[in-house]
Image (cartoon, helix red, strand yellow):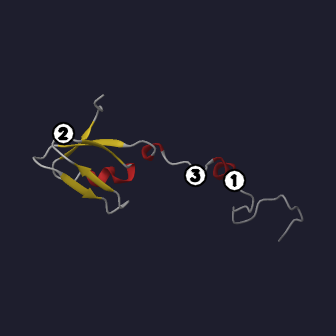
Amino acid sequence: MCCGHKSAPSRTGYSSAPSQRSAARSPQTPPASQSSSATFEYTGATGLTVVSPTTGKRYRFDAPGAQLSIDPLDHSMMLYVPNLRPVRFTRT
C-alpha cells in the first residue's frame, strides 16, 4: 500500500537515484597496481623473446643481464618464465 509520499524508500531497499559511492568512483581510473610498470632482468645464457598471451606484446631480451620494463598486465605471467627475475631497483 502506498502512502502517497514520493520520497519514501521503496520496500525492496533499492532506489533509482545513483548512489554517492558509485558516483565518486571513476571507471577510467586504473587501480594503483596497474598504473606502474615493473622491470625484469634476463639471467639466461643467450637471448630470449617472450610473447604475452594477455596483451600480445613481444618482449626481447637480447643478452644476459638485459632489462626491460614490462606492462603491468603481463607482470604475473612473467614471473613464471624461466631465467627472468623482477628487478627491485632499476640501474641508472
Disc nearer the start of the sequence (1/3): 1
Residue 68 visible within the image: yes
Give the amino acid type for the residue marked by disc 2 in the picture.
Gly
- Which residue is at 67% across, 51% downward? 23
Residue 56: image location, x then y, percent: 35, 61
Could you tell me if the residues under marks 3 and 2 are in contact, i.e. CB atoms within 8 Å?
no
Give the vertical position of 92 relative to 28 (above or below): above
Residue 81 visible within the image: no
Q: Quadrant of residue 38?
A: top left
In the rendered image, which residue does mark 1 sit on?
19
Q: CA distance from mark 1 to mark 2?
A: 51 Å
In the rendered image, which residue does mark 2 sit on?
65
In the rendered image, which residue does mark 3 sit on?
28
Q: Could you tell whether 30 is left or right of 40 in the image? A: right
- Which residue is at 16% across, 50% downward? 47
Q: Could you say which is closer to the camera, residue 80 or residue 16?
A: 80
